[in-house]
Image: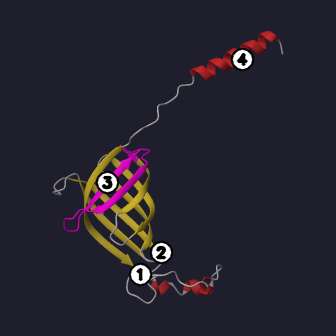
Amino acid sequence: MSRRLATALAAVAAAAIVAVPVAPAKTHGRSVVFYAKPARAQFINHADDRARGNKVNPFNADLVPAPPKANSGKKGARAGDNALFSLTLYSDAKLKRSVGTAIYSCTFNFAQNAICEADFELKNGSMIAMGPARLDGTPIVLAVTGGTGRYSGAHGQVTSTASGSANTQIVRFQLG
């Protein structure tokens, strides 16, 4: 390679490095708050389906003791049962201005732990969230994994907390 070509390539490489813009790091996200009122709840008990797992069990689960507080022999949800919650979302605490709906679909594990997926349909787009949750009255915190419209590419977290008013929730999005 000629010295002239090597010098030209080095100059192009140096110019390319200098010309690369560096985006500033985001130091804060935006917060969006909604108030939610339950519209409907449905629980799906899969007790009639549990025997199916006894026949094909590659993990030898019968040899492993049940986790503590596994609801064995007690009333209430058991591992594999589902809970579906439909909520109406409002922009104000007095529940006067409806802005959309939310559906939480949770599959129970043991001891009131669940894996939940949530779909938020809003007037300017939608958001989805998912993750593990405790369904024992403590706040539910899920990862926001995407969205459409105004919320396209949304990421962050959503926290659902009892508001103190009868059967209402505060749904707070912290988006990055």
- N-terminal-most mark, 4 or 3: 4
Image depth: mark 3 or mark 1 in front: 3
Mark 3 highlights which residue? Answer: 172
Residue topped by disc 4: 10
Instruction: Name the residue rendered at 39%, 46% in the picture.
Output: 175
Q: Position of residue 3 (x, y in %)?
A: 81, 11
Residue closest to the eye, 37 or 10: 10
Q: Name the residue carrying label 1.
A: 45
Task: State yes or no: discs 4 and 1 in contact (Cβ < 8 Å).
Answer: no
31 horizontally vs 165: left or right? right
Q: Amino acid at mark 3?
A: Arg
Amino acid type of the residue tagged 2 in the rendering: Asn
At horizontal 19% and vertical 56% (from top left) the residue drawn is 93
**Location of residue 160 in the rendering, given as x and y in whole percent from the top left corner:** 32, 60
Expressed as whole percent of the image width and height from the top left, the position of residue 69 reads 45, 81
Distance from the alpha carbon under mark 4 to that under mark 3: 52 Å
Which quadrant of the figure has residue 55?
bottom right
Looking at the rendered image, the quarter that the C terminus falls into is top left
- Contact, mark 4 vs mark 2 (Cβ under 8 Å): no
* SS label for mark 1: loop
Between 39 and 79, the one lying in front of the other is 79
Which residue was labeled with disc 2? 109
The N terminus: image quadrant: top right
Q: Earlier in the sequence, mark 3 or mark 2?
A: 2
Amino acid identity at mark 4? Ala
Asked if the stretch drawn in magenta spans residue 135, the answer is: no
Would you place residue 127 above or below residue 81 in this image? above
